[in-house]
């Protein structure tokens, strides 16, 4: 029994010694190892663009575990950074398309790029148009203005009459024209504003005009015509400053008279002529319309065509011409011989 008990004590002592050694050895190894390094973060996801203006925009993305910093890339160029899940991009160009992605990073490195997002900045706010009154008639007016610069990317022009929106007209190059119709007699004010994808720009200064009832010309008729011209005339009107004459809808001239000659027409051709009365303040009447047809082309004229008919009458005319010459000669002789030398009268009976 004593021997067995001694063996057990020896075994337990050995196990205890081994355990102590293992514990001590493990503790030393754990102290000697460097701290565990974190892995580089994964790429951000769910990137979105918002708050897009003329020269700036905001982007946001979902957070990435283990990331301590984010970098925003614009068109492949490192643009800005943030420790948050969003950033504002400044210094962009108006009305320009950009592609943006984001990378995440920490002490161990940088992630790959996130999915990209593409957006387009807004154009600059339109400037102020400068309209003018081109004409006023008995039911409305015509206004015009130069187009705003192409760099403002104007899509439409918005027209207001007496403070009320009336129409949008598509922008075009050069001079813009708008017809204002169905207006009541009296004073009116018109303003114009440019509109693009950004917003409506400032209104122009209001233009004032007066719609007055101007009577249209009466008695419009063809006074004369030829194969390439016509003369139209009309009745005189009171308080009319001038008249405008139109040919097939195109203005051909103005006059203060009650007639007008239109030249350069084609023979045997039908035309639509319009005459409009204009008051001194620029108000116009409705157009008095008239359909006119020029004469046919006259036959060709030749020298023989003129001589032959004339000389055909010579045999009949010659005897009469001889008698006339004879009588005229006799009278001349008689008057010449009425006085003699010294002034004595020879032929009293003459």
Image (cartoon, grey):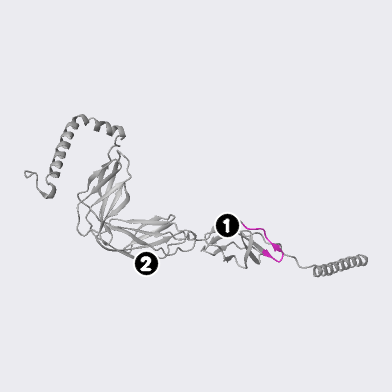
Between 54 and 337, the one lying in front of the other is: 337
Q: Is residue 80 magenta?
A: no
> Element at badge 2?
loop
Image-based side of 161 in relation to 18, left or right: left
Q: Which residue is mark 1?
A: 117
Q: Which mark is residue 135?
A: none
Between 85 and 28, the one lying in front of the other is: 85
> Who's the residue at 37% across and 66% down the image?
205
Quadrant where the C terminus sits is top left
Mark 2 surroundings within 10 Å by alpha-carbon count, few (fewer than 14), some (14 through 19), many (20 or more): some
**Outermost residue toward the front?**
342
- Which secondary structure is most common in the magenta stretch? loop
**Outermost residue toward the left?**
349
Quadrant where the N terminus sits is bottom right
Residue 313 shows in this picture: no
Q: Which residue is mark 2?
A: 205
Image-based side of 254 in relation to 174, left or right: left
> Who's the residue at 21% across and 60% down the image?
239
Residue numbers of the magenta segment: 105-114
> Who's the residue at 31% across and 39% down the image?
267
Image-based side of 251 in relation to 123, left or right: left
Between 234 and 60, the one lying in front of the other is: 234
Image-based side of 113 in relation to 183, left or right: right
* Residue 17 picture location, percent across and down: 87, 68
Q: Is residue 113 magenta?
A: yes
* Residue 56 picture location, percent across and down: 54, 65
> Element at badge 1?
strand
């Amino acid at each position: 029994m004593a021997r067995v008990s001694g063996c057990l004590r020896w075994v337990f002592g050995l196990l205890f010694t081994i355990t102590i050694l293992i514990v001590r050895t493990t503790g030393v190894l754990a102290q000697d190892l460097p701290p565990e390094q974190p892995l580089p973060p994964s790429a951000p996801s769910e990137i979105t663009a918002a708050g897009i203006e003329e020269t700036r925009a905001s982007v946001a993305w979902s957070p990435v575990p283990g990331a301590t910093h984010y970098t925003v890339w614009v068109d492949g160029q490192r643009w800005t950074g943030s420790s948050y899940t969003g950033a504002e991009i400044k210094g962009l160009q108006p009305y320009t398309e950009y592609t943006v992605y984001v990378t995440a990073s920490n002490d161990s490195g940088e992630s790959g790029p996130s999915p990209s997002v593409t957006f387009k900045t807004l154009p600059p706010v339109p400037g102020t148009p400068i309209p003018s009154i081109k004409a006023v008639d008995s039911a409305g007016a015509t206004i015009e203005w130069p187009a705003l610069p192409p760099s403002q990317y104007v899509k439409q022009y918005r027209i207001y009459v007496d403070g009320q929106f009336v129409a949008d007209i598509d922008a075009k190059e050069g001079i813009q024209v708008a017809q204002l119709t169905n207006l009541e007699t009296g004073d009116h004010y018109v303003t114009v504003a440019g509109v693009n994808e950004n917003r409506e720009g400032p209104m122009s200064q209001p233009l004032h005009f007066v719609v007055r009832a101007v009577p249209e010309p009466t008695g419009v008729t063809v006074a004369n015509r030829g194969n390439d011209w016509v003369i139209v005339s009309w009745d005189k009107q009171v308080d009319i400053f001038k008249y405008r004459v139109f040919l097939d809808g195109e203005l051909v001239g103005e006059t203060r008279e009650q007639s007008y000659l239109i030249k350069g027409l084609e023979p045997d051709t039908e035309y639509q002529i319009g005459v409009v009365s204009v008051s001194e303040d620029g108000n116009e009447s409705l157009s008095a319309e008239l359909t006119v047809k020029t004469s046919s082309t006259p036959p060709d004229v030749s020298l023989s065509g003129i001589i032959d008919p004339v000389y055909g009458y010579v045999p009949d005319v010659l005897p009469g011409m001889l008698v006339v010459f004879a009588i005229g000669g006799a009278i001349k002789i008689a008057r010449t011989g009425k006085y003699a030398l010294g002034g004595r009268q020879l032929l009293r009976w003459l």
